[in-house]
Amino acid sequence: MKRRAFIWLLGAAAAWPLSARAQMATSDSLLPSWNDGAAKQAIFDFVRATIDRASASYVLPEDRIAVFDQDGTLWVEHPMYTQVVYCLERVPALEKILAATLTGMSVEEFKTEAKKWLETAKHPRWNRSYTELAYQPMLEVLRYLRDNAYKTYIVTGGGQDFVRVYAGKVYGIPPEQVVGTAGGTKYGYGKDGKPFLTKEPKLILNDNNAGKPEGIHLMIGRRPYAAFGNSTGDRQMLEWTAAGAGERLKMLVLHDDAAREYAYGPAQGLPDTKIGVFTPALYEEAKKDGWTVISMKNDWKRIFAFE
């Protein structure tokens, strides 16, 4: 009798929706690179509340949108943003670096150039490719949300075309789900008569600060239910997310682990920085409004997959 009951239970479990099966797994198996604590629990509580049809906070699958800043939230941003390193290595001259590097070529040429650079460039601290420096705990969150029918987007101040080159491989996020700082393109024809798009030195969207919720509205058209950032540049995105009705997940990564990665703030007395600034004012806003601050030092068992 027990054997038949066990076989029936296995069959029933296999028939359950993926999100329901995912919720039965242990917390360690779902987010293995996270330490138990308030941050990890906040993610579980949010997902359970929003996928449970009996919950007052239930969110329809088509409305399940989660947005992630990239630099400092999904991968390393110190000692310099990866795209800035790319620009400096391609055009050593300091004058008009971004315009000279990212414009005046077809979108396909740019994609090829960026991909070629990413295949060989190494971070000076770890001597590993930049694409290996994605944070393992955040990759697990991306998968966990997608397993529960959330559509995950990158919303970054970095160049949209640049991030789209590797977002699929690194994060499992397709190019159409990358919202970033965008320049103009011009339609034209080559000598062979084939059409092509050329990048132009014209800014269409500055996807930072207030530009992030503006870009979300322009490119996604739905208010997110979950938002992840790490700096003052993400503040308005989290505010916009929090202003919606129902359960909302708002999280900020605090870089407080100099031994395994970097430590900078200046929130919580951490060293000041010009890259990925997390101010005391932002920290106070997070605490006052119920946003969750993720301590890299305390909340993450490991930071990178290669550890």
Image (cartoon, grey):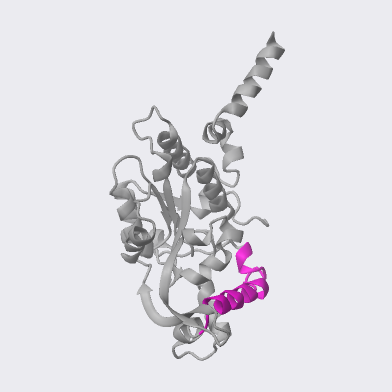
| Residue at figure coordinates x 54%, y 62% from the top left | 75
**Residue at the front extreme of this rendering:** 193
Q: How many labels does the image show?
A: 0
Work out which quarter of the rendered image holds the N terminus and state it.
top right
Does residue 281 appear to the left or right of 142 in the view shown?
A: left
Q: As displayed, is residue 266 above or below residue 94?
A: above
Please state which of residues 111 and 299 is positioned toward the viewer in this rendering. 111
Does residue 198 appear to the left or right of 136 in the view shown?
A: left
Q: Is residue 77 visible?
A: no
Q: How far across and how far down the image is residue 206, in percent? A: 36, 71
| Residue at figure coordinates x 61%, y 68% from the top left | 130
| Residue at figure coordinates x 32%, y 62% from the top left | 214
Please state which of residues 200 and 142 is positioned toward the viewer in this rendering. 200
Please state which of residues 42 and 211 is positioned toward the viewer in this rendering. 211
Work out which quarter of the rendered image holds the C terminus and state it.
bottom right
Q: How far across and how far down the image is residue 133, in percent? A: 60, 63
Q: Main secondary structure of the magenta part?
A: helix
36 in the magenta segment:
no
**Residue at the top extreme of this rendering:** 1
110 in the magenta segment:
yes
The residue segment tinted magenta is 105-132
Q: How far across and how far down the image is residue 14, in percent? A: 62, 28
| Residue at figure coordinates x 54%, y 72% from the top left | 82
Please state which of residues 123 and 149 is positioned toward the viewer in this rendering. 149
Q: How far across and how far down the image is residue 216, in percent? A: 36, 59
